[in-house]
Amino acid sequence: MPDVLTTANGNPVDNDQTSQTAGEWGPVLLQDFHLIDKLAHFDRERIPERVVHAKGAGAHGYFEVTHDITHLSKAKFLDKVGKKTPIFTRFSQVGGEMGSADTLRDVRGFAVKFYTEEGNWDMVGIHTPSFFIRDPSKFPDLIHTQKRNPRTNLKDADMFWDFLSLVPESIHQVTTLYSNRGTPYGYRHMHGYSTHTLSLINDKNEIHYVKFHFKTAQGIKNLRGHEATKLAGDNPDSAVEDLFNAIEKGDYPAWNVLIQVMEQKDAKTYRWNPFDMTKIWPHEDYPLQPIGRMVLNRNPDNFFAETEQSAFSPSHLVPGVDASPDRMLQGRLFSYPDTHRYRLGVNYQQLAINRPISGVHNYQRDGAMTVNGNQGKGPNYGPNSFDGPQQTNAYGTTYVNVALQGDTGRFPFTLTEDDFVQAGDLYRLLPPDEKSDLVDNIAEHLSMAKKEIRDRQIPHFSRADKEYGQRVADAINKRLSQS
Ligand code: HEM
């Protein structure tokens, strides 16, 4: 038997198909609460889409510890081999809107919420191991260039390449993005990375810097540029559909989780600044160590409630896992909860998908959409003598201690030849057919930009690798001469 249809205040509805009118030919009556409430609720259905990563797909699953790392982290969810922690994962595109095509060339988001017994840890990563920029002040500008031109409301090759050509430290990420990795077949067939350096803290309060890698067990599968373009038209939701269907039929996607580990004392002397996210740590220097496995085995029952309302933040941390001095990461620690308060409201952590399974006990009260009983009759201030929740030092150090000296100030990264080395290494590593695809993909887009912008960008490719720059220049000239 289906449920009786009700109004939002629970009254049985006699008729959901015909509005109340003043006679057969008359206007609609204001007293028809059900009609007015139905329309008014509909009018308010949309919340702001994420300012970036608007289009995405989510899935539930678990993380299982496969290797002991208690010498590195005191996090409870990592304390035993075989231990499983429930997770919610959201994959996404970055630049497009809610309705954009899944196969457009873009970085993919790779966000994982671990519901641990000590609160939620969010690993908010992407599918590439490096990034375009290394200072958070540049992020809004970077994103504006990948969105729409303020006048034409069109995507704009001039904006895109103008910015990147003026920010040459982006060359490594540009090389990754224009390789076929920039057009993954779907979410199941790509790796995920913290990209940032994070920190693990053990029970002796020792700190290690780490990078997290999620390696797809399905194998990497990318599209070539023309395949991605075709699929964008044939099935713009191909990645969402691929993930949903695989899980629905029991073909659960999995990722092996590994870390690279750097001793804190080595950070200052390592060749690359470990907090500069335009760089990777080569595996020869810091080999991958397996720690666990992530499996996605349940589709959300409701897209809006779970995927759309999910709110990930790099500042949602647990004892034993912390941030690092990476400037970009520091900017993100602020930005995510800030945007959640705007997008979902001040009580976004009370929504079912975001609620920690470990419980929340504090003195925060009230605010729009308080849905957790507002912590009942307990005291709403601390310290108090009424048995309210108390702070604890049982976890020891829970944030990274860094010895600091010097004056406050603005200390820009200086561009050096070193900023081009990893892009060149990546180019030289690609097999011949993928090198050609990379060059073609760049030429296709960069040839749409103005000459002075092209002339500024091409030398960056040459600085990474002479042949790389020459081939891009030749491919652009060929395209322009044919057009
Ligand atoms: C989403 C800001 C860099 C990964 C977002 C959102 C904002 C934001 C405001 C929307 C969140 C929401 O509405 O729920 C920033 C800022 C950055 C930055 C200010 C730099 C200073 C990065 C980097 C990565 C990253 C470097 C990865 C290494 C993600 C992911 C999402 C996201 C995966 C989507 C999360 C989800 O699925 O809900 N970012 N971002 N972002 N960002 Fe960033």
Image (tube, rainbow, N blue to C red):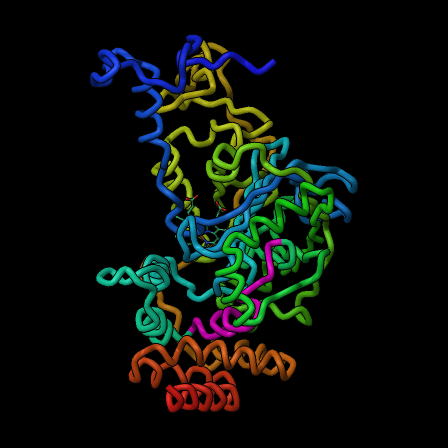
Residue 340: image location, x then y, percent: 40, 39
Q: Which residues are magenta?
A: 169-187
Tell me what residue is drawn at x 29 percent, y 14 percent. 20
Q: Quadrant of residue 327?
A: bottom left
Tell me what residue is drawn at x 47 percent, y 91 percent. 470
Against 325, residue 181 (above or below) is below
Tell me what residue is drawn at x 38 percent, y 91 percent. 481
Residue 87: image location, x then y, percent: 62, 39
In the picture, measured across the screen, residue 235 lies left or right of residue 415, that is right
Residue 249: image location, x then y, percent: 71, 42
Q: Quadrant of residue 287?
A: bottom right
In the picture, measured across the screen, residue 152 lies left or right of residue 357, that is left
Seen from the viewer's position, the closer of residues 483 and 240 is 483
Residue 382: image location, x then y, percent: 42, 19
Q: Does the magenta-highlighted stretch encompass residue 185?
A: yes
Tell me what residue is drawn at x 37 percent, y 72 percent. 164
Against 90, residue 76 (above or below) is above
Is residue 34 among the parts visible in the rendering?
yes
Is residue 402 among the parts visible in the rendering?
no
